[in-house]
Amino acid sequence: MASPSLPPPPEDLKKTCRMRQKDGYMTAHSERNAIALHHPIFVTYFFTVLIIQNDEFRHVDFCDIEHYRACLPTHEQLTAHGITVLNPKDDTFVLLKDGNFLSARPEGTFGFANKANWWEEFRRLSSIPFKFVQEKPFSPHIPHIIHQTDNALHPETGYLENITSLKTMNKDWEYRYYSEKDRIDFIHTHYGWDVLSIYLRLNRLYGAAQADFFRYLCLYQHGGVYLDMKSGSSRPLSSIIRDDDQFIISQWDWSLPQYFEWGKKAELSHIEGGEFPIWCLICAPGHPLMAKVINQLIANIFLYTPNLHSTGSVATLKVTGPILFTRVVFNNLNKFDIRMENILAKGLNPHMVKNIYRKDQYHEQVLPLVIQSTRVGDTI
């Protein structure tokens, strides 16, 4: 299939900034949402940022960097805490104290290790080459819209029966299908060239990663229910979603043999029950938690390193997929009105129909997930 034509980038790149008081702290907003740094910062394997809070080392999601700006340590503060910064190779940094390496832990703390393997490696950034998305109006109700996406201009034959079932069972719901071209048009229309150019950094061989990015953007804009093409339901969606729901999450039901310990990843080892899957997403439009997910994904794309974050399905899970989603959502469970639901028991099914085989499957790809056009990170 020929690549869809791309819209041109906007000509007007003039930056206009304003300060806005929100949630008790100041955040900088602009037409391009620039993130300014007053001194270098350190980013962990988990795409999180090193902070010092209450005299302890911690790391927080990159999407929350503005909230923790006062906790980003300077070189002088690191030295005062006995930390030596070394740059052993390329853009990789390690932080030593008493001969041991500072080692990030999944839950946001740090330990020490006698070897630097994965979770001991940092990136140092003196500048940030990306912007966060603009805030959108939040409506605290989930609209009756079903979203699905695939590359083809029209749904492939193998999915039509499932789509018909969804429409028949949910007659008061609107059904929307998005092709690859529709995704590009949608992102450009609702988010502009800045976000579309980031989306296009994802290697086109990784259709699942592109679909991940799109589903977050789509629900942030319109809200509703997103389902993978192979996913469906045996019950009406209105019987699952309550009138006061704003954001629904789920986990794999480990009591079912076919899903035993699915979503159990090292990066999520601190979360009881494992990942929050993204084959089905349910939220209200403009939900600020979805904005956090999108902003973290943007950071992940720019900070992705094949040698550190791998390729194929492993990279997709970490950079755009359920590992990303789960970590951000888990860190905000007490900040928003989120309802946990066993959607499998409620009739939703991730494998309602067999997935259509693709010639180029992303699972076994050895090429990088992100098209590396620029190097992000310091060297000494």
Image (cartoon, helix red, strand yellow):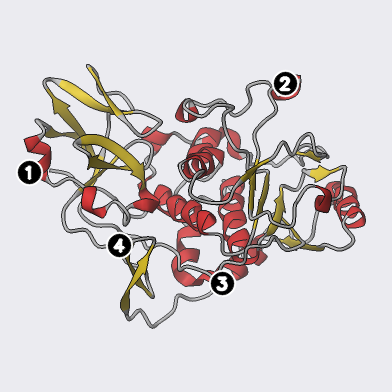
Q: Which residue is mark 4?
A: 35
Q: Residue at x 30, y 23 (%)?
A: 117
Q: Secondary structure at mark 1?
A: helix
Q: Residue at x 79, y 34 (%)?
A: 345
Q: Residues within 10 Å of mark 4 (few under 14, many from 20)?
A: some
Question: Element type at marker 2?
Answer: loop
Residues under numbered marks 2 and 4 in contact, where contact means CB atoms less than 8 Å apart? no
Please say if 38 is above or below 309.
below
Identify residue for label 1: 76
Alpha carbons under labels 2 and 3: distance apart: 41 Å
Mark 3 vs 4, N-terminal side: 4
Image coordinates of residue 176 in percent, x first then y, are 76, 63
Q: Is residue 285 above or below residue 79?
A: below
Label 4, secondary structure: give it.
loop
Residue with the mark numbered 2: 255
Q: Is residue 206 above or below residue 9?
A: above
Q: Nearer the viewer, residue 208 or 73?
A: 73
The picture places residue 312, in percent across and down from the top left corner, at 53, 36
Amino acid at the residue labelled 2: Ser
Q: Which mark is residue 190?
A: 3
Q: What's the residue type where badge 1 is placed?
A: Glu
Picture residue at 92% right of the left edge, 56% below the top: 168
**On the picture, is 32 further left or further right than 179?**
left
